Structure formats: C-alpha cells, structure tokens
Amino acid sequence: MDKNLLKKIKGKLEKEKERLEKTLASFAEKDKKLKGDWDTRMPKMDSGRLEEETDEVEEFSNLLPIENTLELELEKINLALKKIKQEKYGICEKCKEPIPQIRLKIYPQAKYCKKCEVK
Ligand SMILES: [Zn+2]
C-alpha cells in the first residue's frame, strides 16, 4: 500500500480512537482489570427522590448499548493500528484479499472487504 495513504489512514484512526475514548470517558470508566473494557457509571441512588432515580436508571440503560457499540468500534481501531504496525493492514480477514483502498478511506477500521462483510 502507498506509504502516504497509510500514514493518512493511521492519522485518521488515531484521531478516531481519541474521539471514541473521550466520548466513552464522559459516561463510563475504563475497566482497570479488563483491557479495552469500559463500564458505564452506575447511577447514584441517594437523592431520595424516586422520580429522579427512575430517570437515572433509564439513562443508564440507554447508555449501555452505546457503550458496547463504542467499545467494539474502539477495538476495531486498535486492531487496525496493530496491523499497520505489523505491516498487515488492508487485508481482508476472511478471504485474505486486499481490501479496496476506497473502502479503507471511508472506513479505515474495516476488517473485511465488502464482499465478506455482507456475508
Ligand atoms: Zn474478503
């Protein structure tokens, strides 16, 4: 792959990683025991007002799926960065064919080519 393009993609991935980590940190804590895992902060149940507490529980359950999505995305980005380091970036994990550059430009953390992704 073209070195300049790879550098651009790496920059994009690093920026995206930072953005995701910031978003996650705004409502979740990094799990110290499990690398790459985040835990959404539990609502504090000490306001004494039931209505407020119900809202917070609802917010908590709304955040959980978001946390999972962001976590998965972050994992993909870390993997892509690792592959760049190992000079294995841009190869589809299923068919082992190079992923088209146009796809990598749009979605640099892609693990599969378009054909394998939809399967
Ligand atoms: Zn493929």
Image: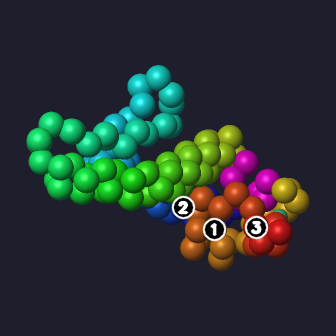
Q: Which part of the image, by quadrant, shows the N terminus? A: bottom right
Is 110 on the left-hand or right-hand side of 17? right
Measure how far apart labels 3 and 1 are at the Cα level: 13 Å
- Which of disc 2 and disc 1 is earlier in sequence? 2
Q: Position of residue 115 (x, y in %)?
A: 82, 72
Is 51 on the left-hand or right-hand side of 104? left
Q: Which mark is residue 9?
A: 2
Looking at the rendered structure, the kind of residue marked 1 is Leu
Q: Residue at x 58, y 68 (%)?
A: 107
Looking at the rendered structure, the kind of residue marked 2 is Ile
Q: Residue at x 21, y 39 (%)?
A: 44
Q: Is label 3 in a helix, a strand or a loop?
A: helix
**Does residue 75 sit above or below 95 in this rendering?**
above
Magenta highlight: main SS: loop
Q: Position of residue 62 (x, y in %)?
A: 38, 58
Q: Residue at x 73, y 48 (%)?
A: 88
Q: Residue furthest front?
A: 50
Q: Which residue is mark 3?
A: 117
Q: Residues within 10 Å of mark 2 (few under 14, many from 20)?
A: many
Q: Position of residue 103 (x, y in %)?
A: 66, 73
- Which of disc 3 and disc 2 is earlier in sequence? 2
Front tag of 3 and 1:
3
Q: Are marks 1 and 2 in contact (CB under 8 Å)?
A: yes
Q: Which residue is mark 1?
A: 104
Quarter residue 116 falls in: bottom right
Q: Is mark 3 within 8 Å of ligand 1?
A: yes
Looking at the rendered structure, the kind of residue marked 3 is Glu
The magenta-colored residue range is 88-93
